[in-house]
Image (spheres, rainbow, N blue to C red):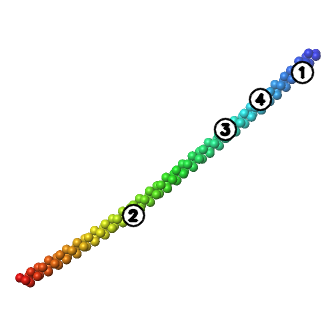
Amino acid sequence: LQKDKEEAAAAAVMQKEKEETAVATAAALQKEKEAAAAALVASMQNQEEEAAVAAVAVLQKDKEEAAAAAVMQKEKEETAVATAAALQKEKEAAAAALVASMQNQEEEAAVAAVAVLQKDKEE
């Protein structure tokens, strides 16, 4: 009986140690699970932050390209205005040259007419 009692006590101690080991193992697994979950959350947050940074960079690039396009459009408009002004000046210069040419022809015709009248008078 004493031997059975001692074996039963030893078995109880072993059972208790098994339970404590199981509890400790479960606690360790729980900690690992929590650490893995925390790492996953951190990774997801990091990916979200990286995606946000990338989106901001894309938006910034789009904004800069739009600004550059606006500058180019303004330059095109300024060039068109300058070209129109230059053409207007050329047109005015051509009109002035035509008027001068016509006045010159009128003067030459008047001189010729005076010469003819002078010749007629002399004859």
Q: Earlier in the sequence, mark 2 or mark 1?
A: 1
Q: In the drawing, does residue 23 fall left or right of residue 115? A: right
At horizontal 41% and vertical 59% (from top left) the residue drawn is: 76
Depth check, front residue: 8 or 91? 91
Give the residue pinned by disc 4: 25
Which type of secondary structure does the marked residue at label 3 adopt? helix
| Dot 3 amino acid type | Leu
Depth check, front residue: 47 or 118? 118
CB within 8 Å, label 4 to label 2:
no
Give the residue pinned by disc 2: 81
Of marks 4 and 2, the one in the foreground: 2
Q: Position of residue 97 (x, y in %)?
A: 26, 70
Which type of secondary structure does the marked residue at label 1 adopt? helix
Alpha carbon of mark 1 to alpha carbon of mark 4: how far? 24 Å
Of marks 2 and 3, the one in the foreground: 2
At horizontal 49% and vertical 52% (from top left) the residue drawn is: 65
Q: Position of residue 96 (x, y in %)?
A: 28, 71
Which type of secondary structure does the marked residue at label 2 adopt? helix
- Name the image quarter holding residue 81: bottom left
Q: Position of residue 61 (x, y in %)?
A: 52, 50
Give the residue pinned by disc 3: 40
2 to 72, vertically: above or below? above
Give the residue pinned by disc 1: 9
| Dot 2 amino acid type | Val
Q: Earlier in the sequence, mark 2 or mark 3?
A: 3
| Dot 1 amino acid type | Ala
Of marks 2 and 1, the one in the foreground: 2
Alpha carbon of mark 2 to alpha carbon of mark 1: how far? 107 Å
